[in-house]
Structures are given as structure tokens and as C-alpha cells.
Image: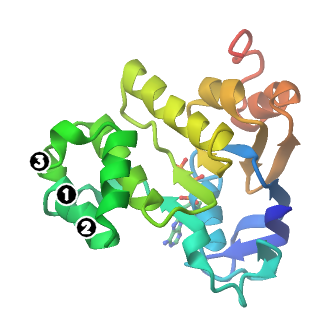
């Protein structure tokens, strides 16, 4: 089953310059899709279109087989925004934040355990480390048990231990809990290692397929021939 299907998607903010052009790809149930591309390539814009925050200029988006215009089952889709973009939008403690998105106390207890948040539940979100904040944002997205999780640069500013911890959680969700995952990241090495498919974007699709064949296309998109030699 295709959880996302994007067909010939074109988008422009100002009606003149296309930020995305003729973009087509799909995500099948159980996929872990890594989205890479240079700054300004349109990656975050693409996620916002898939979330219905923006409307395409042309082309189609399907979620779980339904045209996005008719899709209503948004509980099936979890979104983890860029941490630094929401950091100050979340006053309150971790417990308060989780309670604001989830009424089920048992589910909150499960998420606190699953994401190792026990020691920080009474702390203010803004006072947490980057890795802790990222796990809280994931907990909020998971609170309604979505089948598809979209993440926008979740590893930015995290140290190597926090990245490994966060990636191990995502892989557990993907492999053991059968969640489909779409993750934007500039951490190309991490995505090439863990994603099952790669979408390389630079306004248009430069590459869509297995991580094994992606390197030369990613290098070309970044104008860095040979740069990724040995990364995967
Ligand atoms: N709200 C907006 N209004 C107008 N233009 C925008 C808006 N948001 C993004 N853009 C422009 O659209 C283009 C794509 O931006 P987008 O944030 O999608 O890229 P990105 O690939 O996610 O970049 P980065 O890797 O830097 O996060 C950029 O040229 C950007 O300046």
C-alpha cells in the first residue's frame, strides 16, 4: 500500500518562480524515506504540501490512497517540526505539553517510558537539551499513534550520542512498530545508512530509489563530486 503518492507536483510561493517542479515519488507502507538536497531545494516545502499546509500549483498528492483534498484521517499522520522553529512556541513542562495533545494517561506513561523522558517530565521544554527536546516532539507526534511519521531535520544540533539514540528510536518505530517514516536531513551519512529509500531533491527530483545508487546523484545536486566517497 502506498501511504504517500506524489504525482507531477509543482509549487510556487509567489506564482512566478517554482520552488518545486514536476516532483513525483511514493512511500510504501514500512518504507523509511530519507529526503536530502541543498539549502533552498524545497524539502520543507514538500513536507508542508504533504501535510496540506500549502496547496500545489499543479500535480496531485495522495495519502493512504486518497486525494489530499478529500483526506480527513489526519490522525494517521504524525509531524515532527524543526525543533529550532518551535522551541519558543512551547511554554510549559514536558508533562503539560504531552497532556495538551493526549488525554490518555496510560499512553502518556507509555511514551515517557518508550522515549526515556522520565527524568525530565517536570522540566520546562525550553530548558531541555536539543536531544531531549527532539524526543519530546516525537512523543507529541506519536501520541495519537500515527502510521506515518514526517520529520523535518530532527538531528540538527544533536551530538553523535543523541543522534544515535534518536535514530535507534526511529528504526525501532519503523522495523518493530511498522511505522512508515519520511525524514528530511542534511546528515546524509545517517540517511544513506538507515533509510530504505532516498529522495534527492533540488527543485526537481534528482534521484529516487535505493540508498546504494544515490551517492553520485547527491554529489551532483550539491556540486561536490567525490565528496561522499566512503560515507556509506
Ligand atoms: N513562506 C515562504 N514564502 C516565500 N518563499 C519561501 C517560503 N518558505 C520557503 N521559501 C523559499 O522556498 C525555497 C525552498 O525553501 P525550503 O525551506 O522548502 O527549502 P529546504 O530544502 O527545506 O531548505 P533548507 O535545507 O535550507 O531547510 C527557498 O528559496 C525559500 O527561500
Numbered disc 2: secondary structure = helix
Between residue 10 and residue 140, name the one nearer to us.
140
The spot of residue 75 in percent (x, y) is: 55, 73
Asked if residue 117 can be seen in this view, the reply is yes
Q: Quadrant of the C terminus?
A: top right
Residue at image point 40% right, 41% down: 114
The spot of residue 222 in percent (x, y) is: 69, 34
Picture mark count: 3
112 over 15 or under it: above or below: above
Q: CA distance from mark 1 to mark 3?
A: 8 Å
Q: CA distance from mark 3 to mark 2?
A: 14 Å
Asked if residue 37 can be seen in this view, the reply is no
Q: Which residue is mark 3?
A: 123
The answer to whether the residue bearing label 1 lies less than 8 angstroms from the nearest atom of ligand 1 is: no
Numbered disc 3: secondary structure = loop
Q: Which residue is mark 2?
A: 99
Q: Give yes or no for contact between labels 1 and 2 (Cβ–Cβ under 8 Å).
A: yes
Q: Which mark is residue 95?
A: 1
Residue 23: image quadrant is bottom right
Between residue 213 and residue 26, name the one nearer to us.
26
Amino acid at each position: 500500500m502506498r501511504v504517500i503518492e506524489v504525482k507531477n507536483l509543482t509549487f510556487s510561493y509567489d506564482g512566478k518562480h517554482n520552488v518545486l517542479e514536476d516532483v513525483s515519488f511514493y512511500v510504501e507502507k514500512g518504507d523509511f524515506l530519507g529526503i536530502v538536497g541543498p539549502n533552498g531545494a524545497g524539502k520543507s516545502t514538500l513536507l508542508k504540501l504533504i501535510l496540506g499546509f500549502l496547496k500545489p500549483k499543479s500535480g496531485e498528492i495522495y495519502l493512504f490512497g486518497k486525494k489530499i483534498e478529500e483526506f480527513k484521517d489526519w490522525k494517521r499522520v504524525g509531524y515532527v517540526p524543526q525543533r529550532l522553529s518551535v522551541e519558543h512556541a512551547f511554554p510549559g513542562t514536558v508533562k503539560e505539553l504531552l497532556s495538551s495533545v493526549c488525554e490518555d494517561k496510560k499512553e502518556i506513561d507509555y511514551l515517557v517510558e518508550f522515549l526515556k523522558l522520565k527524568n525530565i517530565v517536570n522540566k520546562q521544554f525550553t530548558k531541555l537539551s536539543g536531544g531531549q527536546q527532539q524526543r519530546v516532539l516525537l512523543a507529541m507526534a506519536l501520541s495519537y499513534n500515527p502510521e506515518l511519521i514526517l520529520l523535518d531535520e530532527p538531528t540538527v544540533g544533536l551530538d553523535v550520542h543523541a543522534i544515535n539514540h534518536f535514530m535507534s528510536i526511529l528504526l525501532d518505530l519503523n522495523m518493530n512498530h511498522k511505522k512508515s517514516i519520511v525524514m528530511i536531513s542534511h546528515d546524509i551519512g545517517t540517511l544513506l545508512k538507515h533509510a530504505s529509500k532516498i529522495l534527492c531533491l533540488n527543485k526537481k527530483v534528482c534521484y529516487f530509489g535505493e540508498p546504494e545508487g544515490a551517492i553520485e546523484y547527491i554529489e551532483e545536486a550539491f556540486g561536490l563530486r567525490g565528496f561522499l566517497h566512503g560515507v556509506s
